[in-house]
Amino acid sequence: MALTGLFLCLFLMVHLSANSILLLPESTARALYNSYSTTLRESLLVKIVAYVLYLSILLHVGYGLLITLANQRAKPKKYAVNTFGENSSWTSQNMGLLGTMVLLFLVVHLANFWARIKLGMGAGVGMDAQGHVDVYEVTYSLFQNLYFVVFYTLLMVPLGLHLHHGLKSAFMTLGFYHKKGLRVLAKVSLVYAAIMAIGFGIIPFIVYLK
Ligand code: HEM
């Protein structure tokens, strides 16, 4: 869980940087976003990394499900008194629920983009002036629909909470228990999770307003 989770955290940083291109003026953003996306799809190295990514998602989801079910079986009755913050946070006790919400987001997201662009499913995708698949257009047309904008933005709340606890606990699972270091780690996890949730959450809104 820790290793696949950290790899997914790294992917999200790269993915957010790439998607922030969408916020540039259209004259530069369209060509840059489309050529970046084409380079990724055509590079052998990136193709291999993409398969590692898919495998990491499957392992992370599968093992997460097993752990959540095992925890429920070990403690079928809830605590009579459960004061969050005294021993563990609400987030840490609900990682399964938060992860399921992120998974729901991912299924919709992959159907919106990945299935359309990589698998050629659904409505066809046009080309830009440079002859690249117009991924920019796919994004802009999706975020003209306010339902998708709200869905993408709202689901970044569970993503942020999941990342906040997940990043900290991944380092601890791997044996990081330095007292002062843990305080720094808690702050880094908070900043990381906030940047990811706010960053991914505002892009659809800005695109909609543009
Ligand atoms: C503003 C929000 C987002 C936008 C505009 C966006 C855009 C895209 C696009 C355009 C693709 C297809 C890339 C291509 O094949 O050329 C893609 C793929 C993907 N996205 Fe996102 N994304 C967003 C947020 C997220 C988030 C929050 C996650 C994870 C929780 C995520 C996970 C993925 C994954 C796993 C893929 C497949 C990557 C691959 O096949 O290499 N995305 N996204």
Image (spheres, rainbow, N blue to C red):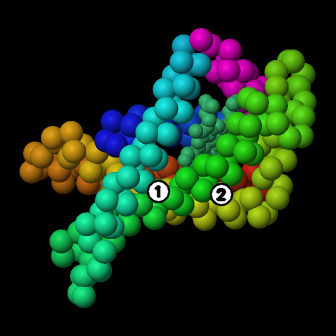
Give the residue drawn at x 55%, y 53%.
Answer: 103
Whether ligand 1 has any atom under 8 Å from the Cβ at mark 2 is answered as: yes
Residue 128 percent across, percent down from the top left: 88, 26
Vertical placement of residue 176 versus 72, above or below: above
User: Is residue 189 among what the camera can see?
Assistant: no
According to the picture, the residue beneath numbered tag 1 turns out to be: 99
Precedes in sequence: disc 1 or disc 2: 1
Give the residue drawn at x 68%, y 62%.
Answer: 151
Q: 107 left or right of 31?
A: left
**Quadrant of residue 164 within the rendered picture:** bottom left
Give the residue drawn at x 49%, y 39%.
Answer: 58
Q: Quadrant of the N terminus?
A: top left
According to the picture, the residue beneath numbered tag 2 turns out to be: 152
Residue 129 percent across, percent down from the top left: 90, 22
Q: How many marks?
A: 2
Span highlighted in magenta in the image: 25-44
Q: Secondary structure at mark 1?
A: helix
Between label 1 and label 2, give the one nearer the viewer: 1
